[in-house]
Structures are given as structure tokens and as C-alpha cells.
Amino acid sequence: MTGPLVVLVGPMGVGKSTVGLLLAEHLGVGFRDTDEDIVAAEGRSIAEIFVDEGEAAFRAVEKRAVRTALAEHDGVLALGGGAVLDADTRALLAGARVVYLSMDVEEAVRRTGLGAARPLLAVNPRKQWRELMEARRHLYEQIAVAVVPTDGRTPEEVTQEVLNAV
Ligand code: S3P
């Protein structure tokens, strides 16, 4: 077991799941998504975990989910947009083939709309997006071996770029 072939990171709504599935298909491997692992393990939605227990508790659960997935999965792995906030998680990703799917703030606002299903965007999405991007961009860049911009590109085009990059 050598860990995932490719780990996708980047902000919510950037297309990690869509591109991840396409990528897995191209590579003939499985796709795994830590958000889905968390929902399955907890038996409730991520929004519910945020509301019931707060962000810090969610991050602790997420850290464990990332650790487990990195140890168990050898295909394509997508992480939740905020997983990189945790220093232990970033350390676990050292040496992995991490690809950062990026997008600019306006594209993010367009893609996620009012973000009702995403707890971090409940009010004033544009301002919150700007803050999120500013706080996280350097963390994504720090752990990524490649950055693939997604603005104005289809999932197939992004997938091709990722395949070229890894
Ligand atoms: C989050 C991103 C979400 C999910 C949670 C928090 C974030 O994952 O983990 O809502 O902090 O950016 P996706 O990036 O898969 O939407």
C-alpha cells in the first residue's frame, strides 16, 4: 500500500468530486471523498455536525477521516475544502501527489450561489469567499505538487490538466 495516486485539494465547489470521479475513471482506480466518509461514519450531514458540535469538532473528525483514507486508499482521494487548515493533516500529506484545483472568488460565488447547503457560506458569500481564499490559498499551495486553475474550464479539461500534471 503506497497511499493515494492523486489527492485533490481546493475550495468547496471547485469540482473535486466531479474531477476526482473522472480522473479515477481515466486511471482505472477507485474514488474516495473524505466528506462522504465522514457522513457515512457519523450518520448525519456535515451541516448537521457543524450545527450540533461546531467547526472545531468537525475538524477533529475530519482529521481522523483524512488519516484513515490516506492509509487505506490507493486511488484518487478528494479532501474537504478546509482539511488543509489542520497542521497534522498537512504533515500527513507531505510526499503525496497533491493537486490543488483553484478558482477565483467570482467563479466561486457563481458556482456555489448562496451556499445554503454549505455552513461556511451561510451569510454574505462573497465576503466569506474572499476571506476563505485569503486564509487558505497559501496552505493549498504549500502542500500541492501542482496547481490546476479551473476558471472557465470544463471538468474534462481540468481532468486532462491534472493527468498532465501528475
Ligand atoms: C468545508 C468544505 C466542505 C466540507 C465542510 C467544510 C470547508 O467540503 O468539508 O462543509 O471548510 O471548506 P467540500 O470542499 O467537499 O465542499
Image (cartoon, rainbow, N blue to C red):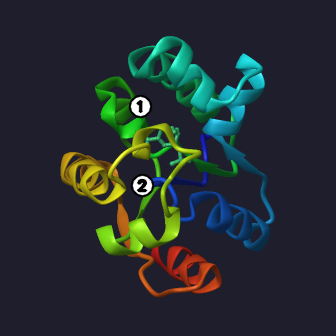
Q: Secondary structure at mark 1?
A: helix
Give amino acid for label 1. Answer: Leu
Q: Quadrant of residue 59?
A: top left
Q: Secondary structure at mark 2?
A: loop
Where residue 166 sits: x, y (%)?
49, 69
Identify the residue position indicated by label 1 in the image: 92
What residue is rendered at 61% in x and 40% in y? 2
Where residue 115 sits: x, y (%)?
50, 53
Q: Quadrant of residue 82?
A: top left
Which of the pair 127/65 is nearer the observer?
127
Mark number displayed over residue 138: none
Residue 49 in sight here: yes
Identify the residue position indicated by label 2 in the image: 11
Quadrant in which the N terminus is drawn: top right
Residue 77 relative to residue 106: left or right = right
What residue is rendered at 44% in x and 17% in y? 54
Which of the pair 68/131 is nearer the observer?
131
Where residue 153 sits: x, y (%)?
51, 86
* Residue labelled 2 has its Cβ within 8 Å of some atom of ligand 1: yes
What residue is rendered at 60% in x and 54% in y? 5
